[in-house]
Image (spheres, rainbow, N blue to C red):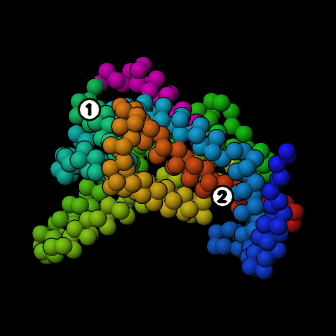
């Protein structure tokens, strides 16, 4: 006895021919959002869906997340080997920077869930508390090479075949850009921690002379979250602008950067709250044992890699339609 196939044509007709759906399509074809450069909303959405389906968005995100995970600790080793030498100089003028490690720990815990933040910070603290000049050697150069693999994988996820918008990079140039971006992202992270410390010191100084009380705590939290938001925006904007091999670079102020920043920060905070607030780490630990932290880090990286690629696809959709329209007009 053969099974009857479910007829989905009625559902398709309902959703495609419904007056509300038709009205939304008409609006999307005739209107554009700010930052879309006049490209209709409908064209952008269709392009993103098509590219996500053709290039398998989740496979790309998984590949990027795995590569970043493997390069995470080499990146930390590369960047924070130099931090103790820099802090020794800066603390002469800014004594508040002696709290660098504690502030860094608090900022890591804001976005990394469970004990993942503790493990990452423990590795950072071991490096920053005991600077090793010997690391600045051949091993340090190897760490630089391996730390850039994650960035290289992300750059490959940003590659497209639209020759009017995207160009090809040679192997050596691609590797150099990946190394440069890795260092740049690290500098942004360190600078943000320094800004948070200085901001807290300034707010504390204001409170000392004005006795604002509870309002001071509000200002400190506002400084930290504003710095975190700016850090996400600048890093993502830099990745899109210099990581993608485009003929005309993406702007820092773009819909893709804005979308990715909001989603990435919100997802990181929500995921961290889910793991810590509902004691999910203990649940994972019961099932997976000592590798629970690795699984949580991988999930966090996968979510953020997926968001980065979605934001990039949004920028790519706008750029492709914008540049193709200009070619047709010429």
Residue that numbered label 2 is attached to:
315
Of the residues under marks 1 and 2, which one precedes in the sequence?
A: 1
Residue placed most toward the observer, 79 or 105: 105
- SS of the residue under disc 1: helix
Viewer-nearest residue: 51 or 130: 51
What is the spatial separation of the Cα atoms under label 1 and label 2, in whole angstroms?
Answer: 40 Å
Q: Which residues are magenta?
A: 133-154
Q: Quadrant of residue 115?
A: top left
Q: Residue furthest front?
A: 1
Asked whether the beta carbons under mark 1 and mark 2 sit within 8 Å of each other, the answer is no
Q: Nearer the viewer, residue 245 or 280?
A: 280
Q: Residue at x 25, y 55 (%)?
A: 197
In this rendering, the answer to whether 327 lies above or below 147 is: below
Image height check: is 176 above or below 7? above
Q: Residue at x 26, y 70 (%)?
A: 218
Looking at the rendering, which quadrant does residue 137 occupy? Answer: top left
Residue ID for mark 1:
126
Inspect this view and state whether residue 79 appears: no
Q: Quadrant of the C terminus?
A: bottom right
Whether residue 224 is visible, yes or no, is yes
């Amino acid at each position: 006895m053969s099974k009857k196939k479910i007829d989905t044509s009625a559902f398709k007709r309902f959703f495609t021919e419904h007056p509300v759906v038709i009205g939304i399509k008409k609006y999307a074809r005739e209107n554009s959002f700010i930052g879309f450069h006049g490209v209709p909303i409908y064209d952008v959405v269709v392009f993103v869906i098509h590219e996500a389906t053709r290039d398998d968005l989740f496979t790309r995100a998984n590949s990027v997340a795995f590569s970043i995970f493997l390069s995470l600790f080499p990146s930390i080793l590369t960047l924070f080997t130099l931090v103790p030498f820099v802090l020794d100089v800066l603390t002469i003028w800014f004594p508040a920077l002696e709290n660098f490690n504690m502030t860094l720990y608090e900022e890591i815990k804001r976005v990394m869930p469970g004990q993942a933040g503790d493990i990452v910070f423990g590795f950072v603290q071991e490096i920053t508390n005991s600077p090793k000049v010997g690391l600045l050697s051949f091993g340090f150069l190897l760490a630089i090479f391996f730390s850039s693999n994650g960035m290289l994988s992300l750059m490959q996820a940003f590659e497209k075949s639209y020759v009017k918008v995207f160009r090809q990079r040679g192997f050596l140039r691609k590797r150099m850009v990946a190394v440069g971006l890795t260092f740049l992202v690290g500098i942004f992270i360190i600078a943000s921690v320094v800004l948070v410390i200085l901001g807290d010191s300034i707010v504390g100084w204001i409170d000392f002379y004005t006795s604002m009380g509870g309002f001071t705590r509000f200002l400190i939290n506002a400084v930290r979250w504003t710095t975190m938001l700016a850090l996400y925006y600048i890093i993502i904007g830099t990745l899109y602008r210099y990581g993608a091999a485009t003929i005309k670079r993406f702007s820092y102020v773009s819909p893709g950067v804005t979308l990715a920043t909001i989603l990435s920060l919100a997802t990181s905070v929500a995921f961290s709250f889910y793991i810590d607030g509902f004691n999910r780490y203990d649940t994972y630990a019961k099932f997976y044992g000592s590798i629970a932290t690795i699984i949580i880090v991988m999930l966090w990286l996968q979510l953020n890699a997926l968001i980065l690629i979605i934001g990039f696809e949004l920028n790519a959709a706008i750029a492709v339609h914008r540049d193709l329209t200009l070619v047709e007009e010429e």
